[in-house]
Amino acid sequence: MASASSGRPTLEAVASVAGVSRATVSRVINGVPTVDPAIVDVVRRAIEDTGYVPNLAARSLVTRRTGSVALVVSEPPGHRSPLPFLERIFTDPYLGRVTAGAQEALRPRDVHLAIMPADPPAHDQVVRYVRQGHVDGVLLITSSADDPLPARLVGLGVPVVLSARITGGAMPGGVPAVDLDQAAGGRLAAEHLLATGRRRLAVVTGPTDAPFMRARLDAFVAAVTAAGLGRPAVADADFTRPGGEAAARRLLAGFPGVDGIFAGNDLMADGVSTALQSAGRRVPDDVAVVGFDDSSAAAQAHPPLTTVRQPVEDMARRMAELLLEGMGVREPGTDPGADAPDDAARPGRVVTFAPELVIRSSA
């Protein structure tokens, strides 16, 4: 710690301004949960008034924490897309929504978020970074049960929370997750298209090795066939606008009478809508289009997309809360002996959110 003669504010200076002991200031800085919230506020104001900057290296020795967590966006080996990995993840509104939601939980605890894209060449780098102790936990976005990265991260012994429930393959068991009722979302899309009189239906999917996409697809198909219609046509894509456009062109070539299309996310739905209109099909008069996510892409599309909303920000905030609980970090002033919430980060706990249909102009 710098002395007063160095000109830098000291812990003692903060204690004097706050009217508390040096030990109390230290407990506030180190996030000890037993400090009265009113005293925490006084000390934080004193820190701001004095301009005191904690010695993070010394703090980490005391707390055994770095004050950072990683948001890892993983792609499994073998995934194929015409767009580079970084371009896909940073142009998809989903990542921004996850980041915003996670920050709502992390920022009040003074925990920083490091975003780490991880296509297969970067898997070793991410594992090395986490193993070296640069972060206290991992929020992990992955789409495949065969992705080897989750098992490698869990094997390091750091807390990990998944963005979706994924079982089987290389996925380790017992990892907490936050998910959407994906099947309910697929049913909502099918029921809406059927209710608007569409009878020649098709689906544009993302990669179906992603369990959430498979659940959406299977539920959509089941709802359509239960209504007495034939199995919908299916065209594969890659969760991107260009992928949606290409899939729609293939559908029109092989199934020209299609009058309703469900796309597995809003970016693909926007691409589908663009391809349809380029082919002279009116949306929704000739072909209705339903997306999934209710991202900014849905509202900005022409016409604006009817879509199945998943509350990504709320889901990401809950992911971060579960991770903090797994790390033993509580809200300042919380009784450390208090019972954990019902959906705390117990092994294998999955918190499930419900989807909603948002009706706009495309269907």
Image (spheres, helix red, strand yellow):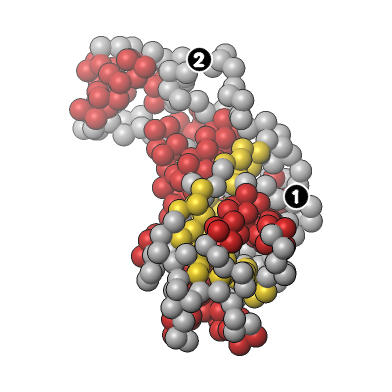
The local secondary structure at tag 1 comes to: loop
Q: Quadrant of the N terminus?
A: top left
Q: In this view, does 237 lie to the left or right of 293?
A: right
How many discs mark residues in the rendered view?
2
- Residue depth check, mark 2 versus mark 1: number of the one nearer the observer: 1
Work out whether mark 2 precedes mark 1 in sequence or the reverse, and give the earlier one.
1
Q: Is residue 11 left or right of residue 49?
A: right
The residue identified by callout 1 is: 167
Q: Can residue 123 be seen in this view?
A: no
Which one is nearer the viewer's eye here, 125 or 73?
73
Which one is nearer the viewer's eye here, 107 or 267?
267
Name the kind of residue labelled 1 in the image. Thr
Residue at 25 percent across and 12 percent down: it is 19
Which one is nearer the viewer's eye here, 27 or 301?
301
- Residue 138 vertical position relative to residue 340 in the rendered view, above or below: below
The local secondary structure at tag 2 comes to: loop
Mark 1, residues whose alpha carbon is within 10 Å: few (<14), some, or many (≥20)? some
Residue at 45 percent across and 25 percent down: it is 331
Estimate the spatial distance between the alpha carbons at disc 2 and disc 1, rounded to whole Å.
35 Å
Image disc number at residue 283? none
Q: Give the image location of residue 145, x and y in percent.
A: 73, 56
Name the kind of residue labelled 2 in the image. Asp
Q: Give the image location of residue 244, x and y in percent.
A: 54, 75
- Residue 102 vertical position relative to residue 143 in the rendered view, above or below: above
The residue identified by callout 2 is: 335
Residue at 62 percent across and 49 percent down: it is 184
Mark 2, residues whose alpha carbon is within 10 Å: few (<14), some, or many (≥20)? few
Name which quarter of the figure residue 24 lies in.
Answer: top left
Q: Give the image location of residue 227, x and y in percent.
A: 69, 59
